[in-house]
Amino acid sequence: MDAVTVRTRDVEHARAEVGRVFCPHRLTPQPGVHSVRLRMAARRVGGVGIIDLDYGQAVRIQPTPLETFYLVQIPRSGGTVVRHAGHAVTSTPDVASVLSPYDASDMHWSEGSPHRIFYADRRAIDRELARLLGRPVDGPIRFDIGMAMTTPTARAWARGVDFLAAELSQPTDASLLDHPQVAARFEQGLIGKLLLAHRHTYSDLLAEPARHPAPGRLVRQACALISDHHGEALTVGDVAEALRVSVRTLQDCFRRELQTTPTAYLRACRLDAVHRTLRTSDRGMSVTTAALQHGFVHLGRFASDYRARFGEAPSTTLRR
């Protein structure tokens, strides 16, 4: 994991340090402002990252096109006027601004508007959208500039962003994301959720009804693949890609044939594997180790799901 922490009151130093994390830009204090109170903590793993950024003063920021990454900028308080790709939005804690890689931006941050910024590599966005569609992406992905953060889907995504930020703040060897396979799985889920939560140029394609000529056969193939590989860094996107269908097609076939989702089926396979491990392990095994070995990242959610499936806490199983 990469991490950068900067504090400075010097405008030119602030511009240079923020530029190293993001891209070249102009930084102009607003009239009457002669310095900044920059606080920046930037943390990254794989193709995603979190930047907590506060200039402490009213400033104007004019970045060049981002080119290789996307940003979702969420004010913690205050407000920001963002102009990007011919559109404008007033961003508040309830409305994030989303910058795509292809156009320059012009932003006016008010005094007292610290931001939590989600960074996603352009290749990671392209790759995850291809998984969702079941085919390669053949054109630029442009998000709408304003993202409402008050919908249930957006709130769920924002909880994932905060979880990512918390784990990236942990000391070395203390984060759930230290394991590359766990980090990759979480990255895919967070980007996939963003692509489903916020409108972009491919949203209509994602919403089209999914059809498959042999749904029963597809589900049997998917179940066999999940049963054989659930202990690996496997996601529903991986399953869909292996079977050469879109994630939506796979989901619809699972609902039609099994009245469940591929995510739920994969989770059940992993829960069963943890249960077997805890029942047969020696005293040196811990619940956390068993859960992580079988692909669970959010340990609170794991414990709840385990209790619902087996009627007892995982620690109870381990003590038997």
Image (cartoon, rainbow, N blue to C red):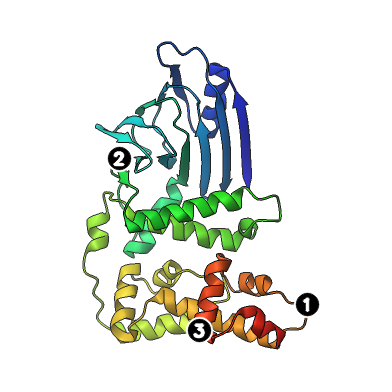
Amino acid under label 2? Ile
Q: Foreground mark, 3 or 2?
A: 3
Gap in Å between the C-alphas at discs 3 and 2?
Answer: 42 Å
Residue 34 vertical placement versus 140 (above, below): above
Q: Residue at x 51, y 49 (%)?
A: 47
Q: How many marks?
A: 3
Per the model, the C-alpha gap separating discs 1 and 3 is 24 Å
Residue 55 image offset from top left, x and y in percent: 50, 26
Q: Secondary structure at mark 2?
A: loop
Q: Amino acid at mark 3?
A: Arg
Q: Is residue 293 or residue 93 the one in the foreground?
A: 93
Going from N to C along the chain, the mark reached first, 1 or 2, is 2
Q: Is residue 127 visible?
A: no
Q: Image check: 141 left or right of 38?
A: left
**Residue count near mark 1 (Cα–Cα under 10 Å), binned few <14, some 14–19, many ≥20:** few
Which quadrant is the C terminus positioned in? bottom right
Q: Is residue 237 visible?
A: yes
Q: Position of residue 175 (x, y in %)?
A: 65, 56
Give the residue number, with chain letter if any, for mark 1.
Answer: 284
Question: From the viewer's perspective, is the residue at label 1 or at label 2 nearer?
Answer: 1
- Give the quadrant of residue 263: bottom left
In the image: residue 276, left or right of residue 86? right
Q: Amino acid at mark 1?
A: Gly
Please rate how many residues cluster around mark 2, counting C-alpha atoms within 10 Å: few if below 14, some from 14 to 19, many from 20. Answer: many
Q: Report which residue position mark 2 lands on.
A: 145
Residue at mark 3: 309
Q: CA distance from mark 1 to mark 2?
A: 51 Å
Quarter where residue 253 is shown: bottom left
Q: Secondary structure at mark 1?
A: loop
Q: Position of residue 121 (x, y in %)?
A: 46, 46
